[in-house]
Image: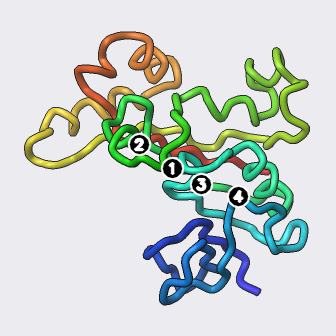
Amino acid sequence: MKKKLNLGCGNDIRSDYVNLDIAALDGVDVVHDLNQLPLPFEDGVFEEILCLDVFEHVDYPPLLRECHRILSPGGRITIEVPHFSSNNNFVDPTHRNRFSVKTLNFFVEDSWEQKHRPYYFDFTFSTLVVRRLLFIRSLPFFWNYLIEPVVNISPKLQQYYEATGLTYLFPAQNLRVVLQK
């Protein structure tokens, strides 16, 4: 079995991944509704899971618990979701969740959120490897070429960006987080 899972792949079919989606599209290896848990995989079988534009559509804590279950020790999950300031949150009527730079901290050992609310969830990831705000990078939004690297210098700058009106002047498009089991 391939050691990588592309969860909720849609049309983003990747040849070196097991591609899972609710729709039986060309290239989808496993057809499964992510609202129906457990996922159809054994414990610890994947070294890497991609969840690109998935968690905003589902009740994500139970799905994240399942991803944790099927990840091998040391495995990584890459999560990309619209940032709460993105206008894409409000375009798609199937979006159920909003995310800030600190939302997924609840699932990371030694985070402030986990230390103060350890009773929320019965699983944690060992490390938050990457947390990055992504901005539209195209000509009409030329200022984003400068803003994105500055905002992502440190977690404190990311939090400052969110805590001030900067999110409304310069809305982020997506949030990318990589968690390691």
Q: Which residue is mark 2?
A: 174
Instruction: Measuring from the top left, give residue 68's x and y in whole percent.
Output: 80, 54
Q: Secondary structure at mark 1?
A: strand
- Give the side of residue 72 with respect to residue 170, left or right: right
Rate crowding at label 1 as few (under 14), some (14 to 19) or many (20 or more) other CA atoms within 10 Å: many
Q: Which residue is mark 1?
A: 80
Q: Is residue 113 above or below residue 70?
A: above
1 or 4: mark nearer the eye? 4
User: What amino acid does circle 4 point to?
Assistant: Asn
- Give the side of residue 26 with respect to residue 166, left or right: right
User: What amino acid does circle 2 point to?
Assistant: Asn
Residues 157 and 174: in front is 174
Q: Which residue is mark 3?
A: 78
Q: Which residue is mark 4?
A: 35
Q: Quadrant of residue 51?
A: bottom right
Q: Secondary structure at mark 3?
A: strand
C-beta proximity under 8 Å, tags 3 and 1: yes
- Report the quarter where the N terminus lies: bottom right
Rate crowding at label 2 as few (under 14), some (14 to 19) or many (20 or more) other CA atoms within 10 Å: many
Q: Who comes first in sequence, dot 3 or dot 2? A: 3
Residues 93 and 124: in front is 93
